[in-house]
Structures are given as structure tokens and as C-alpha cells.
Amino acid sequence: MKILVCVSKTPDTTAKVAFKDSNTKYDDAGVQWIINPYDEWYSLVRAIELKEKDAATVIHLVTVGTADADTVIRKALALGGDEAIRINADSHDSFYIASQIAYIAKEGGYDLIFTGKETIDYNGSSIGGMVAELLDMPYASLVLKFDLNGNTATTTREIEGGEEVSEVNLPLVVSSQQGMAEPRIPNMRGIMAARSKPLKVVEPIAVDALTSIVSFELPQAKAGVKLVDADNVAELVRLLHEEAKVI
Amino acid sequence: MSVLIFIDQADGHIKKSSFETLTYGADVAKQLGTTAEALLLGTSTEDIATLGKYGISKVYHIANDSLNNLDAQVYTQVIADAVTQANASVVIFSHNQTGKAVAARVATKLKAGLVAGACALPDTSNGFVVKKTVFSGKAFANVSISSAVKVISVNPNSHTTIIGDGVAEVASLNITVPTPKVKVIAVNKTSGDIPLTEADIVVSGGRGLKGPENWGIIIDLAKALGAATACSRPVSDSDWRPHHEHVGQTGIQVAPNLYIAVGISGAIQHLAGVNRSKIIVVINKDPEAPFFKAADYGIVGDAFEVLPKLTEEIKKFKAGA
């Protein structure tokens, strides 16, 4: 079994959101970088759990990014995984990124490809579907639970107001979300081992991006909270009906 | 060069988010001076021609049984064929569970640029630029699509449905439906509740409720309002409430018209899951709770006293309305 886990570096969930160069670039001054939570907590940890059950399983990590992503990838390797591949490119176009990953995935002949359901910065939620299409594989999206029985995967995915349980044969692309695995933190042995794990850097293939970010905007600040006295909840009902018009 | 809108349904019923995307697609078509058409996959119990009231002229209906369950690979093949046959240049999805499974695949198959999570109509004054939410709703990005065919998935609850009085022509397309590889073995619906991501009103509880045994006051208020219930992360982590109710950056992102937060302090990760709500009401006994800064209305008070009173007032209001 060969598993490819797609990881991305994202700003820490508490990082402030600001932009520079006339609102065309994210201002990353002083930002702490983390592994995208959906990639780390759910995809990678679930892959590690599968390897713990079947020692013959090989886990490779792949990321598309420049050298400043290396620290985050080493952290991912400290959790587990056998080696990492960094495709040396900087892009925010999902199709460009997915094409790079699909190229590596095709070369590596993976049985199972995990992505997070989205990154918490650009919220594209597209890489899994695009990679699946480029590789002509089935795609299980927004997966809450994942089990493997030989060559057959059982997935539970989120649907409106419930869950859907399906079976599908490998190879398969999965996008993971909360529920897939219990978050872990790397231990000292993992951190030491990660230092000597291979981190291969490859150059990107030529792909034309289909989208580009023109500018960023911050939402307008709220006008300020209107406080209602706790003894006068009828006033809140009136405001919600007459002023906000939401009930 | 029309606009084609994908209609999402479950159990033969069209989802609410699809009515919004129909209106969105009709508005895009108006802007581009073209027609809006829609695509419905699987058998349906609805009167399809009446969908014309959302501003679309034609619905392509492929009533094939094997399309009643979602297999993203099969859907992609069928939708891409439909886009080609209908000669559509803009394809619209809802950015809901189905849209997230399919839109990116369809875009890739068509070599079309995708904006996922759009929150406004495209700006076509200079190219084709679509505004979308980024950083979990803490910012917006204006994204330009350079390909000939363009795919947009629209955030639920970000476009107002407009109902007119048109009637749509119902047509079929000559498309071969591939055999699904994904076999659905069970669908578990959360019984009778309103789906969180489709709800107009959400009542959400946090650690301030002190324990799962106190959730009755949240449920009572939700019932009175016809609302869905939700919770903060510490609540679902402590198993007071199921994980699928967890709203926040790493949980479910919601965008209802009204979000009522009870006993939730308003950590930045929680706000990321709710900041697309139209109106936020915060009820918290701590006047310093950061959530008040993000709220439209607030009550500083004890939830155990305020909520039962509020539920009574809502019931009175509903009885009188």
C-alpha cells in the first residue's frame, strides 16, 4: 500500500489577517506557520494509523511551495511518514497546484491520496477533486470516517443533515475533515527521526494557471453591538423583527 | 454561450441552496446578455417547469436512476458533457457538499478556471473577476478567471433568491451515464432536525451552558424559532454534543440570517465559522466576552434566566405574527 498525503503550510489559526503591496499580497510579517489542520490532524494522522496496522504501508508527503515550507514539512514528518516531496513553486491557482501533485502521484503509483477538505487560508476546497480528475480516480469528499478492508475503502462523508456511507475500490482520492482521526502531536523520537528522513525537492512541470488573485479586501467592521437589557428580552424580539428583519 | 446552473437535489427534492444559485446564474446571464439554463440529474418529484420562476429559460433533465446517488466521477462526466452540448461558457454550482465534490472536477475536465466559495456576482467590466471568501471568512479575494469557460461555486446564503413568474422548457440531453464506482450502502440522516448548513436561523451553545444536561434551553429556543442547533468546539470535544454540530474554523462554517450564540466567548476560531452570518446575537454573562465585538445585538446576562424568557417571547411573537 502506497499512500500520498498532500500537505500545505498555512498561517496559524490565530494569525492576524492583513495585506500589503496595495492589498495584493498576504502580509505574513510575524506570522506563525503551521501544517493546514485538515492535512495534519485528519489526513496525515489517519494515514499513520493505517500504517500502524499494516507495516508494509509507505507514506509519502507532498507539498507545493518554496523553501520556507521546509520547516513545516519536517514537522509533518515528525508525526510520521517515510519521505516528503516538495515541488518548488509558489502559486495560488488550484489547477496549477493540483496538476503538480497529479504529476507526482502518477509517477509514484499511489493507491490512496489524502488531501484536507480545504486549506484554512485560501479555502479553495478544490485540490482533491482536481487531482482525482487528473488521475481519473474516484473521489470521496468531506470524509468523516475512513476504513480499509483489503482493496476496498469504506468512507463516511458529510451530506446535508447527515452522513452517507459508501464503498469504493482503490485507487482513490479522499478529502478529509474532522472525525477521521484524533489529532496527535509529534514526540521527541519522531522529531529526531524526521531530521534524517528524505525531503526531495523537484522542479514544477509547465502548467498555465487558470486564475489569479487581483486583490484582497477586509470585511467592513460591524457598527457595534446594540445591548438589550436582560430583563427586557421582548425588546430583542422586536429589534430582530423590525430592525434586522430576520424573524 | 449560455450560463448553466447545476441543480442539487436529495431524495428527489431540490435543495434550498440551489434556488439561490438559480437566481445567481440568472443574474450572471442578465449581466452577460445571454440565457440562463439549468441541469438536473437523477429522478425528481418536483414540477421542473416551474423552476422558470427563478429566471431560467430551460432545464436539462437527465432522469437516470444511477444519478440518484453522488459519484463525483460519474457526475463530472455527465455535467461536462452537458456543458459542451449546451454550449455554456459559465457554469454555476452551490458551494455546498455536492458542489465541493464536483465543481473542481468539472472545472478540471473542462480546463476551466474555478472560483470556489464566491460571495458576489462577477465583475465583468474588465475581464471576469469573482469575489470569494478567504481566511475562513476573515477576508475576501477578488479572483480573475482567464479561461474561456468559467466555473463558480457560490457560498450558500450569500445571494438572495428572487421569484418571478417564468416557466422553463424541460429538455433532455443525449448523454451516456457511466457506471458508478462508488456504492452507497447507508444514509444516516440526523432525525427530523434542520440541516445546519441549510438553516436560516442557528442557536448555538458553548461552555457557558455548563453541561449536556442543560441543552434543553437551547433546543427549546431553536424549536420556537424553527432553527438548527450548533455548538462550540470545546462542547463537541467534551462530547456534550455531536461533532457534526461543531461550528468554527475546523468544524462547520455556517452563514445563516440569524446566529444566536449562548455562553460562547467568541474565540477567533469560532468566529471564523460564523462570521458570514447576517445578524449575530450574543448572550453571555461576561460583558468582556470577545464575541460582543462581532455581534449586532447582545444581552449581558445569565443564559439560564434569559433563554427561557426569550423562548416565551418568541412563542408569543409567532402566535401573534
Image: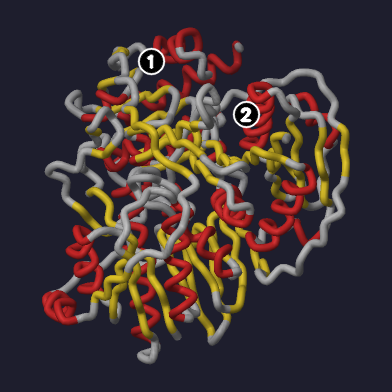
Whether residues under marks 1 and 2 lie with C-beta atoms below 8 angstroms apart, the answer is no
Disc 2 element:
helix
Q: At 27% from the left edge and 71% from the top edge, which residue is drawn?
A: A201
Q: Nearer the viewer, mark 1 or mark 2?
A: 2
Q: Give the chain letter at badge 2.
A: B
Q: At 54% from the left edge and 45% from the top edge, which residue is drawn?
A: B113
Q: Is residue B115 above or below residue B286?
A: below
Specify the farthest residue to the front: A206
Which of the two residues, A33 or A96, is positioned nearer the viewer here? Answer: A96
Q: Amino acid at mark 1?
A: Val
Dot 1: within a 10 Å radius of its alpha carbon, few (fewer than 14), some, or many (20 or more) residues?
Answer: many
Q: At 25% from the left edge and 21% from the top edge, which residue is drawn?
A: B300
Q: Is residue B94 left or right of residue A16?
A: right
x, y percentage for residue A48?
Answer: 34, 77
Find residue A181 and report its image quarter.
bottom left
Q: Which residue is mark 2?
A: B24
Quote the CA–CA distance across marks 1 and 2.
Answer: 37 Å
Query: Residue A233: which disc?
Result: 1
Q: Amino acid at mark 2?
A: Tyr
Dot 2: within a 10 Å radius of its alpha carbon, few (fewer than 14), some, or many (20 or more) residues?
Answer: many
Disc 1 element:
helix
Q: Is residue A159 above or below residue B314?
A: below
Q: Is residue B79 left or right of residue B218?
A: right
Specify the farthest residue to the bottom: A56
x, y percentage for residue A130?
Answer: 52, 59
Query: Residue A66: which disc?
Result: none
Residue B196 visible in the shown view: no
Quadrant in which the N terminus of chain A appears? bottom left
Q: Give the chain letter at badge 1.
A: A
x, y percentage for residue B314?
Answer: 50, 20
